[in-house]
Image: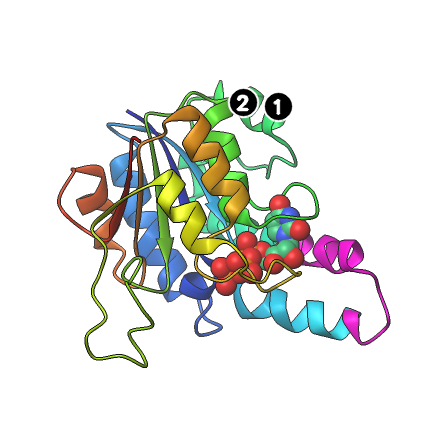
Amino acid sequence: MKIVVAIGGSILLKEYDSKKFQKYSEILKDLSKEHELFVVVGGGKPARDYISAVRNLNAGEAQCDDIGIEVTRLNAKLLLIALGDSAYQRVPHNFQEALEFSSSGKIIVMGGTEPAHSTDAVSAILAEYVHADKLINLTSVDGLYTKDPNKFDDAELVSEITASDLLDFLNGKDMKAGTYEFFDTTAVQMIKRSNLETVIANGYEPENLIKAINGESIGTKVINE
Ligand code: UTP
């Protein structure tokens, strides 16, 4: 299968060390023997720290986004180093480059592209662009809950949802630089228009990537209308 994997920066850089990069690189190398892989890496805390510093300098939102994009590319570079020869050793800055680099047959790793969305959207657009079979978004929560699980004991994990219902759920959520909450609506629009098979799962356990690829019931699956 051709698979786009989005890994949240909050997963890779919960701590400022190399452990998650190493673990993910082992799993990705293994999976690349069977699948064609495109990985999109998020910004995490470093991106938010830089964005808040630049916002305090009175930068506009798009300029804040630009700084966030730089950090996602830096994180992508770290994963490239961890993957070594299994990955194409340049970070694509746009989808055309990602497609071109993929003719190497190696794993492609990228970060952000342009302002006004998050790397969730990058991964969904990339999946469209390269005609991926599946999009797997590895994030810091188990998936979508009926309500905030930190506040409500009776919150339940939503195992399946249509893209339209997910869009309704996300409507009105904050979209400023560094503040995409659960999932970016631009990403859901792409998933909806392409009927893209998507799984949103917890990335703290890198093995969840294998489970999601194997079709095991995990996280929240975005299903056809
Ligand atoms: P992330 O995709 O990591 O955003 O990009 P996020 O969802 O806020 O963070 P985590 O990692 O899931 O916790 C970081 C920031 O970089 C900018 C946005 O400001 C985003 O919030 N960005 C990223 C863009 O403007 N365009 C892109 O293509 C990617």
- Residue 59 lies within the magenta run: yes
Up/down of 221 relative to 21, above or below: above
Residue 150: percent from left, percent from top: 31, 79
Instruction: Give how far apart the Cα atoms at labels 2 and 1 are.
Output: 5 Å
Q: Secondary structure at mark 2?
A: helix
Q: Quadrant of residue 163?
A: top left
Q: Amino acid at mark 1?
A: Gln
Up/down of 175 relative to 212, above or below: below
Q: Amino acid at mark 2?
A: Leu
- Relative depth, front residue between 223 and 116: 223
Residue at 37 percent of width and 65 percent of height: 19
Q: Secondary structure at mark 1?
A: helix
Residue at 61 percent of width and 48 percent of height: 117
Residue 103: percent from left, percent from top: 49, 18
User: Residue 223, can we see it?
Assistant: yes
Residue 142: percent from left, percent from top: 27, 61
Magenta span: predominant SS is helix
Q: Are marks 2 and 1 in contact (CB under 8 Å)?
A: yes
Q: Which disc is residue 96 wearing?
A: 1
- Relative depth, front residue between 126 and 182: 182
Up/down of 73 relative to 95, above or below: below
Region of the chain picked out in magenta, as a range:
55-70
Label 2 sits on residue: 99
